Amino acid sequence: MNLWKVVISLTILLSTASTGQTQDDTTGDSTAPPPAANDCNGFFLSYTFISREKEYPHLKNASAQPWAFKSVASILNTGKLELKAWKMFIGFHQQEILVSAGGGVLLDGNDFPASVGVNGTYIGGYPQTDLKTAIDTANDLTQIQARVEFKGTQFGLRAPGVPMPKTIKLENDGYKCPAPTRHGKSSMYACCVRNPKLKGKNVTTKYTPRQKADLTMSYDILTAYGNNYLAQVELQNNNPLGKLDHWNLTWEWQRGEFISSMRGAYTHLKDGSGCIFGAAGQQYQDFDFSQVQNCEKKPTITDMPPDKANDDKLGKLPYCCRNGSLLPTTMSKDKSKAVFQLQVYKISPDTSRIDLYPPANWKIVGTLNPSYKCSQPIRVDPQEYPDKTGLQEITRAIASWQVACNITRPKLRNNRCCVSFSSYYNDSAIPCSTCACGCENAKKCNQHAKAMLLPTEALLVPFSNRSVKAKAWAKINHFRVPKPLPCGDNCGVSINWHLNSNHKSGWTGRITLFNWEDINFEDWFVALQFKKSGKGFQKAYSFNGTMLKNPNNTIFMQGVPGMTYLMAETNGSKPGDPRIPGKQQSVLSFEKRFTWGLKVSKGDGFPSRVYFNGEECQLPKDIPTANGRRRRVNIVMIVVLVVTDFLLLRNQV
């Protein structure tokens, strides 16, 4: 009898243990999806607010009180299709400032702290960029689900209110999401499914197809070892109007990596102290960090000068060592590419040769060049290279990632070059707009006043020397003089477009480039885009001019051999004289047979967009009018001058 009691007791205990283990598998895991995910056949998105606490300063104004908050967003693959490079939009709107996003990155590449509380933000996975299916992974949540843990600050919601985003949705192409469902006060979720109306693209690559962009950068792993690897970075300029001078590239290491050595480029700071006193120093205790290239989390990288191209240690790479010059393909296909290599060391737990992760948050800038907005690195098929031995075989990289960057139009008063207009039928030139390139110190000038009209010769002197000419011109022509006077344009480069002539069969214009900077611009170019009249372009007489097919109606011009430098501003000939800008000029001729009906003097003879070295320049809001003041030709005075010259010459004889 006692034996039966023991058996029964053991059976009950085993049964209870078995039942408990089943419940742990389905609901006990804190990362397990909520029950609503069971009804989703696609991608289940959720956002959960965790907590918040009042931050300093403590204010009586509830709308201005800052709160520190924590929340988590997740995306779960509940369907049959794998999702590569997932992208999620979160509609923050409570003046949120994100301080960190564990498990994710901001797709716009902004640094933390990042203000996202107006237009929301786009989140991507890092290091988990792809979501596999439950079928292919036996329901392994670590491969089919991604979680992003947010920490940040929000404003304007009095306790016990819960700051929730307006919406959450999947941003990958081909998916549609309903409005999210609220679950209580602190959670929302949505099920995003494939749009059946969209035909799927025929993808022939294992990873995400390579993207087309104005500028693409690839991060290729060439060799890999347990604790380090050799990577090659390739920059490719694809925009016909894009250009970079003295480029500086930055990124952010996410897993404690450091750069041991480089070839074809270098970092602005060479210092191993960051490694010695950090996690790398603890792991590599016998490592000589005095020779390490860089230990910064966010290094700044620039191109080698040309004299290092054949250096056995620093150069000897194709497309390297051009002093940071990246030309458009319209100027040179060979010089539109740059390459450098770096030896990267990893730290624990990334000690296997398959633990390979690219840096995030790539940014690239030039001296006076367009602004680029770059994506996060996306895994693509390995890059292929021709074999170095010359054999008919291809060498593949171990792993490759692509960063796609596109040019963004400058915001108002954030340009770096500007345009002035003048014409043969009006004596006044319309100068660059007030504060066209920003106004840092506007205490002694009016940054909201319209720029004053000028005599055309005043465009040749710096703005600081134009005040007297501007006021005198206003007095002669009875123009109003603002008080205080308008601020200058503050641009390093200005361009004057002068409508030179207009006749029945054609017309001409003159372009003048002014360099007010202290640096020379090598291999400069300028591009003019017209709405209607560009098709009639015939010739640029002092520049090499070409009509581009893309962008349409755009004239691309560069210096002729021997004139490829736009020289820097120099001192005047005498002490106290105004500084003299570097200057180049050319006349352009146009015909009308392909563009009948043009109204040249009413706008068609002025460009709608102007670019210098890829940077879009700010245009004036007005054009010269035909009813402006013009100097009258005095025939009597001309006759007197001619007769006087004749008499002088006769007396000399």
Image (cartoon, grey):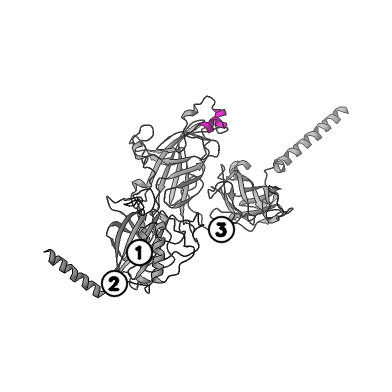
Q: Residue 481, percent across and down? A: 45, 67
Q: Quadrant for residue 139, please give it.
A: top right
Q: Quadrant for residue 479, please give it.
A: bottom left
The residue indicated by pointer 2 is 503
**Discs 1, 3 touching: Cβ within 8 Å:** no
Using the image, tell me which numbered label, if any, was put on residue 196.
3
* Numbered disc in front, either 1 or 3: 1
Residue 123 visible in the shown view: yes
N-term mark: 2 or 3: 3
> Given the current orientation, which residue lies at the most extreme left position?
653
Q: Which residues are magenta?
A: 271-283
Q: Residue 269, percent across and down? A: 47, 37
In this view, 528 is above or below 360: below
Which residue is painted at 63% across and 42% down in the image?
Answer: 141
In this view, 143 is above or below 586: above
115 and 81: which is toward the camera: 115
> Given the current orientation, which residue lies at the most extreme front position?
651
Q: Is residue 279 magenta?
A: yes
Three-letter residue code for mark 1:
Thr
Which residue is painted at 48% across and 58% down in the image?
Answer: 413
| Disc 2 from disc 3: Cα separation | 59 Å
Q: Residues within 10 Å of mark 3 (few under 14, many from 20)?
A: few
| Disc 2 from disc 1: Cα separation | 22 Å
Using the image, tell me which numbered label, if any, was put on residue 89.
none
Left or right: residue 50 compared with residue 503: right
* Numbered disc in front, either 2 or 3: 2
The residue indicated by pointer 1 is 456
97 and 84: which is toward the camera: 97
Q: Residues within 10 Å of mark 1 (few under 14, many from 20)?
A: some
N-term mark: 2 or 1: 1
